[in-house]
Amino acid sequence: MRVLIGPEGHGEVGDDELAELYAAPATPWLRVNMVSTVDGSATGESGRSGSINNHADKRVFDTLRRWADVIVVGAGTARAEGYGTARAPIVLVSRRAEVPERLRGAAPGRVLMATCAEAEHLADAREALGEEHVFVLGSHRVDLAELRARLVERGWSHILSEGGPHLLRDLVAQGVADELTCTFVPRLVAGTHPRITDGPPVDVPLTLHTLLEQDGTLLGRWLL
Ligand SMILES: NC(=O)c1ccc[n+]([C@@H]2O[C@H](COP(=O)([O-])OP(=O)(O)OC[C@H]3O[C@@H](n4cnc5c(N)ncnc54)[C@H](OP(=O)(O)O)[C@@H]3O)[C@@H](O)[C@H]2O)c1
């Protein structure tokens, strides 16, 4: 892996340098990590991002998971990708408060839920995760700025979101994300697939911070 745009003085980028290249410029910091094909698809034929990511993307994915105090993920992604627990606690964002099957047996505090007061499965989520691990952050929609503040209050200042497309769009629309990290894998898949954002239009400028390359894969950091 090499640096195309970013701090000079790096030759081949090893794991320690990669962690330095992805250091947050301030805390608290909320970044969203996504992967896309060159033709803009967020999934491959399996309907998951697992069918488009590659070794270079996995290196960054693992680096960011090591960086994270907490992982925030949309319930749709947790369901589609079959999320299990991770080194850092996982916060599910869900309007309905439905806890995916694989995350139900987790130790207390390893899985949290951010939802709204009208959520269909609120009582069940409280039962499954523990009342103190379920945040009710609005009546009809989840206030993502309030979620960020709650996580920081708990001492989690390195916040990693792994999407998906609807959650990324909402984080950006509510002005809550500091950074998008995105890998562009050198593939075309055509077909009908989601992009890395979904939902009502937004128009948010990004500033390129760093661009890395490995075997034709481009790995970027953009600041919001
Ligand atoms: N390429 C990538 O980097 C990448 C990353 C992640 C996911 N994906 C792919 O994207 C697809 C899933 O897309 P998606 O758009 O459905 O993912 P998503 O944003 O994770 O899931 C949407 C669901 O998450 C909950 N949600 C999201 N934003 C919310 C908000 N602001 N407030 C309350 N709830 C919110 C809702 O769950 P409830 O229905 O429970 O209310 C909503 O139905 C899968 O195929 C996955 O593999 C790709």
Image (cartoon, helix red, strand yellow):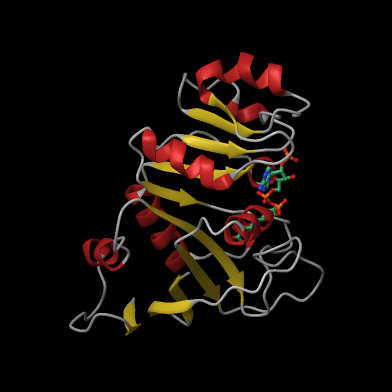
Location of residue 124 in the rendering, given as x and y in whole percent from the top left corner: 69, 17
Q: Nearer the viewer, residue 222 or 15?
A: 222
Is 118 situated left or right of 165 in this image? right
Q: Residue at the location (63% across, 52% down)?
A: 167
The residue furthest right is 192
The answer to which quarter of the image holds residue 135 is: top right
Q: Is residue 91 above or below residue 104?
A: below
The answer to which quarter of the image holds residue 155 is: top left
How many marks are shown on the rendered structure?
0
Q: Residue at the location (32% across, 64% down)?
A: 22
Q: Nearer the viewer, residue 221 or 140?
A: 140
Q: Is residue 65 above or below residue 102?
A: below
Q: Is residue 7 visible?
A: yes
Location of residue 6 in the rendering, given as x and y in whole percent from the top left corner: 30, 81
Location of residue 164 in the rendering, given as x and y in whole percent from the top left corner: 63, 54
The answer to which quarter of the image holds residue 87 is: top left
Location of residue 175 in the rendering, given as x and y in whole percent from the top left corner: 54, 59
Q: Is residue 182 above or below residue 65?
A: below
